[in-house]
Amino acid sequence: MPSTPLREFLEIPYDQLEELNLEAKKMRQDRVDPGKIREKRERYLASQKSIKAVTVCFTDLEGRLHMLDYDKKFLLKSADNLTFDGSSIRGFSQQAESDLRLALDWSAFYWLPSDVFGPGKVLVFSEVHERSGDPYPADLRSRLKTLADGLYAKKGIHCNAAHEIEGFLFQGLDAERRYHEARKFDFISTGGYYHSLPGDPLRQFIDASAEAQRAMGFQNEKDHPEVAPSQFEMNFSYAEVSIAADQVQLYKLLARQVAARMGMTACFLPKPVAGVNGNGMHTNLSLAKGSKNLFHDKKGKDGLSESGWEFISRILGAGDDLCLALNPSVNSYRRLDPHFEAPNQIKASAIDRGSMVRIPIGNEKSARIEVRSIAPDANPYLTLYSLLRVGLEGPAQAEDESKRSRTRFLPDNIHDAIRLFKSSKLMADILGEHVHTRYAELKTAQADRCPKALGALVKVAEVQFHHEVTNQFLWSQF
């Protein structure tokens, strides 16, 4: 007698996944009424019997992605009353005020590759709210979305971004958590820039990760090995800033999961290996109004408009203030080393890749600025929110500063960056005093667990207590 399968969970081919996710992305970019999107998604979940669970995501203050799987039927009944213990999330609520709410952002809905996430699941991002239902100030995703929506509603301005995120592929599972045992990372490949045989492990990993990204609607443009051994980068197209920030979180999640399935580790430490190039998260930004790119001027310097240069001037003027938000870990400051194409100079240039801001070659469609001094372990919502607020509202670089022949440099260690951040009235105004103080405290706690002098060797503590690597158990081993 033939047996019938015990479970028939949703598994969608990659080409169909891409169509579904691109349609959802377009609805989001077109700002379709959120109520209509919610109704459409809930109707779909109710009718699709092969979906067992919904993965709900949120991001904490430091940029760690958290995920909870909700039973589909429970979620549909309780979508307006999802709560979690905020005191268990470092940087969120204190124990006395632990209960927080999750407000589903139904527009940020993704169909998932079942070979990466398991069959029968879909994913949705959420915002974090207070018990009262008000947005939680330490949830920078909510604040970025509110900022972008407000600029569009009041001025018709679209904020667009694209990230170039570098990472390393290392041998073995959980290589970062086991760093204290071997005190080194083992490269999977020692090939060079763009050079990797089609069948080697690095290329297999890149291919599998890029395929999953395309299936989730990233609209990939190119992918390749990077300059350092075992280093990779996969590039995808421009999107509205809140979509772009979500894609950063998904990019790292997909890379880590694909690597783990291959028995390896995808690592986004800014400088996990001394002596070779580090990982960056170059962030491309532009503003548009209707079909007009506000940063483009064919006759402007380097093809950039006056408003584009004003945006840059404000970012450069606040370079020291922004540094800790853009480079949030002890390990970040190893990357800001001028011997390895490090973007540590507080200046803008069309050609000098050591500059904090670069102006890539562009036209009326692609003109943009590229902020290069951002580490891949930074909170993407915090970085985009801070850059937009500073670029649009911050004080411009003083005239005498912009004309000085002597180049200014970003801090070369986290202690100086913390000091500059704590004393910054600009960042306190942008983030609010409470979030500004809490973020500084978190970074100080990390710095205090590590040797003050970076030295020539990557120390165990800067890996073990790194905010993206450690879990609660490791954090307490101090």
Image: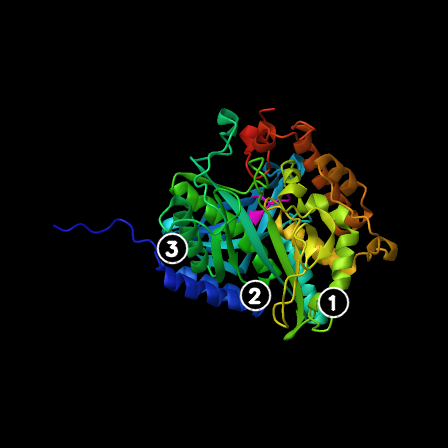
Which type of secondary structure does the marked residue at label 1 adopt? helix
Labelled disc at residue 292: none
The spot of residue 34 in percent (x, y) is: 56, 65
Left or right: residue 302 versus residue 106 is right
Q: Residue at coordinates 58% horizontally, 24% vertically from top-left? A: 477
Determine contact: label 3, label 1, CB under 8 Å.
no
Query: For residue 51, which numbered disc appears in the image?
Result: 3
Q: For this rendering, which residue is in front, 27 or 317? A: 317
The amino acid on which the numbered mark 2 sits, given as a three-letter code, is Pro
- Which badge, 3 or 1, comes first in the chain's sequence? 3
Any part of residue 432 in sight: no
- Write the start and end of the magenta stretch as one range: 58-64
Q: Position of residue 99 (x, y in %)?
A: 61, 42
Which residue appears at 70% of the width and 34% of the height?
444
Q: Which picture quadrant has residue 300?
A: bottom right
Q: Position of residue 384 (x, y in %)?
A: 66, 55
Does residue 223 appear to the left or right of 348 in the view shown? left
Looking at this view, is 6 or 362 the one in front? 362
| Location of residue 96 in the rendering, given as x and y in whole percent from the top left corner | 67, 36
Say which residue label 1 marks. 301
What kind of residue is marked 1? Answer: Lys
Q: Nearer the viewer, residue 214 or 203?
A: 203
Dot 2 corresponds to which residue? 34
Identify the residue at the far bottom of this view: 291
Magenta stretch: dominant secondary structure: loop
